[in-house]
Image: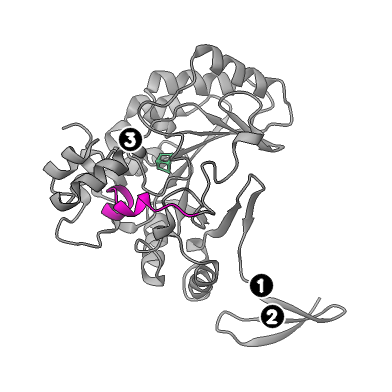
């Protein structure tokens, strides 16, 4: 079975109501649609609030634009010295190899750029991107992103890792992907071999927002990666109607840890066009994060992050537990709201 890439496909799979057909066709004409057969099987057709369907099945709400929403919400473009590279922080670059994904998230922050017809880097453009990395010795880390870089064939992935491995000032390749949970068969022996450079470290950052995305084959794909010696981090987005409650967040982060993935970042929803129905307010989000602290293991606590619109970078939106009351005198709030004096 091939991926579901049109409203007709989704209709035949029982994932969209016929009554919304015209509206959803308009959404699909604007933003790419794809759900892998494996992921489609994880959706509970009887649950109108299914958290997987909400993330991947198009909705008419995506046509609702708001003035504050942006085509390039995290501001990649001003920091792109050559095609495919985003160099916002001194020691690391994004290398956007492909603009396609096996699934298209309805809240994607690069939704204006990604899709099946979008540009991948051609051979000359990849050469120029690699030359930029070679020519800037302050770069220590390359973040492969896109699109989803694990959509590449193992041969192509291996070529890229080999080229990055040969750049002496690089220490780390970080790969951001949804593939292990949405198309686990791609994580085969050839891909595992391709991911590991002989010198450079490869880390995989898995994007997942809900524990229900962890199907049996997906968990096995994660185990193959970790057993192959590839450390994994989790990256999530806080999303209304998907994971905006303490119980779901707790179970999602515990599921990551149980599968040997350290929750790394929980992102505040970006100002991507047509995504306001997913965004939580900063105040309610901070209250949720605060409620996790204390009773949930520290291993299960990601950092809650805002990517400041306009390309100004990522900052933690953590609550402050510290109030200054004099020189070296503080009041510290404990996990249950008690106020404790502290000197230091
Ligand atoms: S996998 Fe990443 S790049 Fe692709 S649609 Fe989802 S958020 Fe966007």
Q: What residue is drawn where x is 52% and y is 59%?
A: 302
**Residue stretch rendered in magenta on the structure:** 53-66
Q: Does the residue labelled 3 lie within 8 Å of ligand 1?
A: yes
Q: Is mark 3 on a helix, strand or loop?
A: loop
Q: Is mark 2 within 8 Å of ligand 1?
A: no
From what the image shows, is residue 307 above or below residue 299?
A: above
* Towards the viewer: 191 or 82: 82
Q: Ligand 1: which quarter?
A: top left
Task: Judge the density around disc 2: few (<14), some (14-19), many (≥20) Cα neighbours within 10 Å.
Answer: some
How far is mark 3 from mark 1, CA to CA?
A: 39 Å
**Residue 182 seen in this snapshot:** no
From what the image shows, is residue 333 above or below residue 312?
A: below
- First of labels 3, 1 by sequence position: 3
Task: Judge the density around disc 1: few (<14), some (14-19), many (≥20) Cα neighbours within 10 Å.
Answer: few
For residue 117, what is the image quadrant? top left
Q: Could you say which disc has been placed on residue 102 in the image?
A: 3
């Amino acid at each position: 079975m091939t991926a579901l890439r049109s409203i007709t496909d989704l209709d035949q799979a029982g994932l969209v109501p016929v009554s919304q057909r015209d509206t959803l066709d308009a959404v699909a004409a604007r933003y790419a649609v794809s759900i892998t057969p494996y992921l489609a099987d994880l959706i509970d057709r009887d649950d109108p609030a299914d958290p997987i369907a909400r993330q991947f099945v198009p909705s008419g709400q995506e046509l609702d634009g708001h003035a504050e929403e942006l085509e390039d919400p995290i501001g990649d473009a001003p920091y792109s010295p050559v095609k495919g590279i985003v160099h916002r922080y001194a020691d690391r670059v994004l290398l956007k190899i492909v603009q396609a994904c096996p699934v298209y998230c309805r809240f994607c922050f690069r939704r204006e750029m990604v899709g099946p017809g979008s540009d991948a880097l051609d051979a000359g453009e990849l050469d120029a991107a690699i030359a930029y990395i070679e020519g800037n010795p302050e770069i220590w880390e390359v973040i492969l992103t896109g699109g989803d870089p694990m959509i590449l064939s193992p041969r192509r992935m291996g070529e890229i890792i080999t080229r990055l491995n040969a750049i002496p000032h690089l220490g780390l390749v970080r790969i951001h992907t949804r593939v292990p949970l949405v198309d686990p068969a791609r994580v085969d022996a050839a891909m595992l071999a391709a991911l590991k450079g002989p010198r450079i470290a490869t880390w995989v950052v898995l994007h997942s927002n809900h524990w229900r995305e962890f199907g049996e084959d997906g968990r096995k794909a994660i185990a193959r990666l970790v057993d192959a010696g590839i450390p994994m981090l989790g990256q999530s987005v806080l999303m209304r109607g998907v994971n905006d409650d303490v119980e779901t967040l707790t179970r999602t982060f515990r599921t990551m840890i149980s599968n040997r993935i350290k929750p790394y970042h929980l992102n505040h929803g970006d100002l991507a066009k047509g995504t306001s129905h997913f965004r939580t307010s900063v105040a309610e989000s901070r209250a949720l994060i605060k409620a996790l602290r204390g009773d949930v293991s520290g291993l299960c606590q990601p950092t809650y992050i805002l990517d400041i619109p306009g390309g100004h970078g990522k900052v933690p939106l953590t609550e402050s537990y510290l109030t200054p009351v004099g020189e070296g005198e503080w009041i510290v709030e404990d996990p249950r709201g008690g106020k404790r004096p502290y000197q230091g």
